[in-house]
Image (cartoon, rainbow, N blue to C red):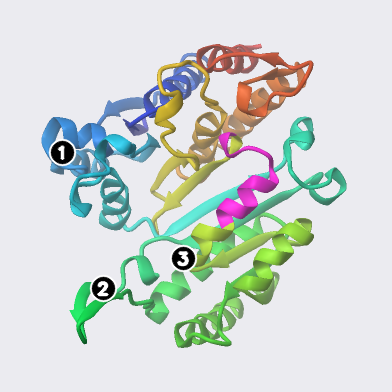
Amino acid sequence: MSKILILPGDGIGKEIVAQAIKVINSLNDNNDMGMSLEDGLIGGAAYDETGSPLPDETIKLAKNCDSILLGAVGGPKWESLERNLRPERGLLGIRSELDLFSNLRPAILYPQLANASSLKSEIVSGLDLMIVRELVGGIYFGKPRGIEIKDGERFGINSATYYESEIARIGHSAFQIAQKRGKRVCSVDKANVLEVCELWREVMEEVSKDYPDVTLSHLYVDNAAMQLVKDPKQFDVIVTSNLFGDVLSDCAAMLTGSIGMLPSASLNKNNYGMYEPIHGSAPDISGKDIANPLATILSVSMMLRYSLNQEELAKKIDIAVIKVLDKGYRTADIAFEGDKIVGTMEMGDLIVEALES
């Protein structure tokens, strides 16, 4: 039996996670999965109830579960709080606490949604790439950091730091994923300017020797951003640092036309994972039954694939999503003229129906 911690979070998180739970319940009922669900708090909802965006109870629950399904965190309601109390600190905190260092961000363009991309269909048709982002190191966590007074004016500092062991483990993660895909890894850095990136490149070369069946290439981050727009299908797996991965993964997401379609996974060394859609909490549409739940439902697919070793059930979810899209059903964010626009709850019901048909 697998135990899953459910963290709906804020904004549309509750609505979209509810649809993913429908899918999990369907899998339990029809495939004897025995997945049990635990509920927890994170983000603004956690702060409102406990005074902390990441309560100790949530960490305790997480450490006693097999994986986590997260909705979204944040919203203007909490922006005036001190930095350490804001919802996003809960997200960063749980990643760090559980050492979820490997962030998998697929960018897949479903053929039914080719018109949603801002690029020409011949550029993006058939797109299927994976960005592997180092998630618990780099400039987001490096020290020293802060804002101080220096020479009579405000001075801000952040430190981009990586140990070679941190680089090596994200490298191994990327190469192992590439072995299951197209066997190509492109490592993205800024080694012509930054010493930390010189080390990054050296370690990636060393790691590559353990994977002779995988081809390694390198790009500077500015060129990588250009190539993602110019010729995105040249990539199979991209591996990069925390900061560069944050930027490039959002760029890659928009190649697909809608961030409402894209899931993500954050894994530790044992493939324990936290799974979440890449979009935010969208408080402006919260409670309106118009949010797209497909990225969250596809996050369940990733959970089955990477943490629970249930590849066939993961494929069932993927196929169910394709079936529903083939029938012309869309939430408003991915709809075009002639499509059948449905709400959040109905889209969840349609996926369950396709799963069970």
Label 2 residue SS? loop
Foreground of the two, 85 or 9: 85
Q: Position of residue 312 (x, y in %)?
A: 61, 33
Q: Which mark is residue 145?
A: 2
Give the quarter of the image for residue 287. Answer: top left
Horizontal side of residue 203 vs 107, given as left or right: left
The prevailing secondary structure element of the residues shown in magenta is helix
Q: Amino acid at mark 1?
A: Glu
**In 3D space, how far apart are the residues under numbered discs 1 and 3 (Cα atoms)?**
30 Å
Instruction: Check the image and name the residue furthest to the front.
Output: 152
Does residue 138 appear in the picture of this structure?
yes
Is residue 308 visible in the rendered image? The answer is: no
Q: Is residue 199 above or below residue 54?
A: below
The residue identified by callout 1 is: 57
- Marks 1 and 3: which is nearer the front? 3
Magenta stretch, residue numbers:
249-260
Q: Is residue 8 left or right of residue 132?
A: left
- Whether residue 128 is in magenta: the answer is no
Q: Which mark is residue 243?
A: 3
Q: Residue furthest right?
A: 122
Q: Residues within 10 Å of mark 3 (few under 14, many from 20)?
A: some
